[in-house]
Image (cartoon, rainbow, N blue to C red):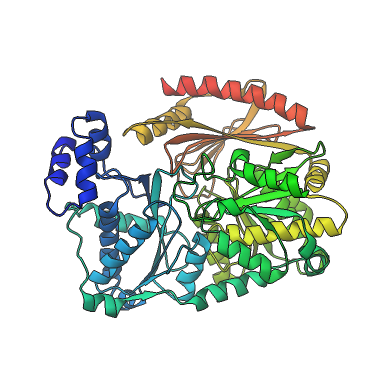
Amino acid sequence: MDYKTAYQSWLNDDRLCEEGKAQLKAIEGNEEEIEYSFGAELEFGTAGMRGIIGYGTNKMNVYTVKRATQGLSQFIKGLGPEAMSRGVVISYDTRLKSDEFAKAAADVLAANGIKVWLFPDVHPVPMLSFAVRELHTVAGIMVTASHNPKQYNGYKVYGEDGAQMSPEDTKVVVGCIEKITDYLGAPEPTAEQLKKYFKYVPASVDKKYYKALTKLTLSKKAVKACGKKLKLVYTPVHGSGYIPVKTILKKIGITATIVEEQTAKDPEFSTVQVPNPEFKETLSMGIALAQKIGATVVFGTDPDSDRLGVAVKNDKGEFEALSGNQVGILLLDYILTRLKEDGKLPANAAVVKSFVTTGMARPICQNFGAELFEVPVGFKFIGEKIKQWEKDGSHTFVFGFEESCGYLRGTHARDKDAVVASMLCAEMVCYYTYKGTTVFDRLNDIYKKYGYVLDCNVSIQYKGLNAMKEMNAVVDGLKETKINKLDIYEIAAIRDYSKDEKLDLATGEVSPIGSPKTNCVYYELKTGSFVCVRPSGTEPKLKIYYSVKANNRDDAEAALKKLQAAMEALLKKAAK
């Protein structure tokens, strides 16, 4: 069915809601908008669905949500009665229509005779992940578009281990979804089915989550001495982190000043341009409050509270936003330091990071005797390591992180947890305050000890229905382009993650990387730096990662400019 026919089919269907009819009538004659809305089906990948809110097969709406949930239902039914009785737990964030989409998903599951638990109010990703395992459900659904702009929403599916669904199971679910051609035909539950299969998640699950987090504290003495008088600012940026972060800080004895204007559950995110706390602009109200009360650290969480952004006051008295890599190495250093000081660092301690995350993690882990593991981008791969080690006992997970502001300590959740990261961040501020220093000073101490590493990410925006195809074509072009230098910097090895192969340029030897396959090219430089190129799995962006090792910041910035210019030329060549 072509997009024009699909458009008319929806518009003329009596089952389409009044809002849908009004929106589709409003774009009548707008070929570009009709083609975007109906020229493709919203892709369901390993991270679920994510798209612009609106009506059509290529947008996030109640019908695409119901279709995806019907496909998930078919998958669960195929697992048998036991899986159906274990059911699915659903959570949602503060985005536009998140509550509506969550209820629609619950209805479809109940109509299929599958038990469903729904959180009664907004709850973040980590609490959904925790609830999957606590309630022993066979799957979980999180309605969110994470840190995307306000016009987006999304739908993520979790497996029974609390991690995002595995690629293998996702493939089966996608097969079930693709067989459903009638978008408006999802089953509706009867009153009896709702009574039998639908329940709200009990408050006891929240209490158990907070209890699990309190067991992860590392600096009780410092918190007791400084926690109540700490000058620290937190903003939930209108997201689901407000209640959980406020609750856990209170439980461990830390007082943070909250940006009250950003506590409202505002789907417009009206006080920020983008609800991504990674950006300094998003933390600007928090920074203004920090300047007013004399605080040195500001931290914030995104709408589904799986990402943490941090800004610190530097030696010039100005606030600077830390990158996800910098926050990661600060938390890594803090966790390993405290565990070692208390004699609690396991002999088989393991840290996991994505392969695009800072090269600084390796020397820190080596210094503490912790083993570092690299996995593909996607926190589910970190979750898989936790699951593996719980089975074989070979390693003890102490920390996992990604450059995209995602962190996890503990095994209570199997996805990024900005609530526990917020707790650790606040506790870390207490610890360094107690020691008579600052977080900014500690970051500089880390650079002095291990050498300076400048991490920088660049995103190239793509548009239109063919965005993903075009991005993958550029990466494919890179794999076919022979190269041994980036400007003056010699390449030691090239990793092709789509083939799970690493080519040593000096010897010509090809060896397996030992990683799940993904379309990504990674250049290892002889200086110890790296450059990596991959398409985003959640946005139409081609992402380029630079991790530049140098003697100091000035040298690193100079090297970065040369590498960026060389990569710009290489990408143009690869795109031809």
- Name the residue at 31% across, 58% down: 173
Quadrant assignment for the N terminus: top left
Question: Left or right of 250: which side holds 158?
Answer: left
Closest to the observer, 456 or 230? 230
Please tell me which residue lies in front, 210 or 275. 275
Q: Is residue 72 above or below residue 117?
A: above
- Work out whether residue 194 or residue 174 is closer to the camera in this orientation and state it: 194
The answer to whether one can see residue 128 in this image is yes
Residue 456 in the image: x percent, y percent?
A: 63, 35
Residue drawn at 82 percent across, 69 percent down: 221
Name which residue lies at 80% across and 48% down.
442
Q: Is residue 39 left or right of residue 337?
A: left
Question: How far across and how far down the image is residue 247, in percent?
Answer: 62, 67
Residue extending farthest to the right is: 436
**Residue 374 visible in image:** no
* Image spot of residue 48 (x, y percent): 38, 52
Residue 511, horizontal then vertical, whole percent? 54, 42
In the image: residue 210, left or right of residue 223: left
Report which quarter residue 179 is drawn in: bottom left
- Does residue 87 lie above or below 427 as drawn? below
Say which quadrant the C terminus sits in. Answer: top left
Which picture quadrant has residue 77? bottom left
